[in-house]
Amino acid sequence: MAMTEHRVSYTLDSSLETIDSAEEKATKIATEIGFSDDEIMQISMAVREAAVNAVLHGNAYAPDKKVTLAFEQTGSELIITIRDQGRGMDLGKIPDPLAPENLLKTSGRGIFLMRSFMDVVEIRPTQSGTELKLIKRVHGPTAGGKEASQ
Amino acid sequence: MSMKVAVRQVDGVTIVDCSGRITLGEGSVVLRDTVRDLLSKGNKKIILNLAEVNYIDSSGIGELVSAFTTTKNQGGELKLLSLTKKVNDLLQITKLYTVFDVKDDEASAVKAFK
């Protein structure tokens, strides 16, 4: 774990335990910052879904691949970054989970939930995988945020 | 807290009292195995009582959908009972609230099968 005054980061294994751990860390930090109970739930769930993406769809549980998770608090925002070392994500191939033909699909709702719960969701490829950046504004608007993908 | 289930019968309807978290991993597996076991034994009228389920993630939502469609495909029927606010909100934003048959009290849920 590396920590500065406003930033903390973790390097985690590609395991189910990492998903639970990421959620717990998000809950703790969001609580300490003073988000409301609803916002804490939204942040922790968004981080959980991002961790699921990184561990399952990115690194595919590979023991030699890591997930990095960072929380940064600025004056007005909590910025959460999750990176994996997987093959990357083709956003164009992610179907709309609200489309009638997709409602009964058993997967494909993770990114939708992140977008619903956070003010900003950015997804971008890196040289070694995918980076998800989640932003929640302190005392800002709640669910139904904006999204910017690259 | 992982997920726990308790199964009981009321007027020919199987009620699965769920508690804890339905999330990727153990929680989803417990739900999947429970519903499959019930269907394999011919129990095709199923109520999932979610009153004590305080957390569900996208995998858990997927598992509820899977339970619903698996039961339906085998000629059965699955209803949800007593959603917590968190679960209710999630089913609303994912538009699944209208897909599932959601009931607020057990008596009307059981009666709805007849």
Image: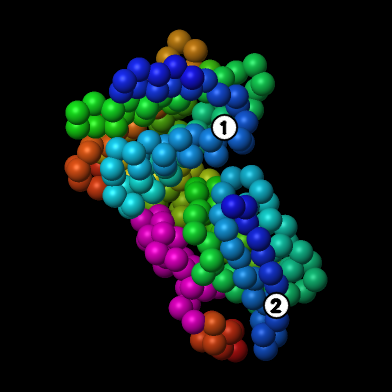
Share a chain, discs 1 and 2?
no
Q: Name the amino acid, label 1.
A: Thr
Q: From this view, report whether residue A16 is shown above or below residue B99.
A: above
Residue B111 seen in the figure? yes
| Residue at 52% over, 73% down | B81
Q: Of tags 1 and 2, which is closer to the observer?
A: 1
In the picture, which quadrant includes the C terminus of chain A? Answer: top left
Secondary structure under badge 1?
helix
Which residue is rendered at x = 54% and y = 66% of the image? B52
x and y percent of residue A47 in the render? 43, 37
Asked if residue B80 is positioned above or below residue A7 in the image, the reply reads: below
Instruction: Judge whether residue B97 is colored magenta.
Output: yes
Q: Name the residue under label 2.
A: B8
Residue lying at 60% horizontally and 89% vertically, measured from the top left: B114
Image height of B102 relative to A53, above or below: below
* B41 up-or-down from A39: above or below: below
Q: Mark 1 points at which residue?
A: A18
- Tell me where residue B36 sits by quadrant: bottom right
- Along the viewing direction, whichever of B102 and B6 lies nearer the viewer: B6
Residue B18: image x %, image y %?
A: 61, 65
Left or right of A130? Residue B69 is right
Separation (CA) of disc 1 from disc 2: 35 Å
Is A130 displayed left or right of B2 in the figure?
Answer: left
Which segment is the magenta one?
A: B76-105
> Was residue A126 drawn as part of the magenta stretch in this picture?
no
> Which scheme is used to colour this image of the protein?
rainbow
Q: Where is residue B34, by image quadrant?
A: bottom right
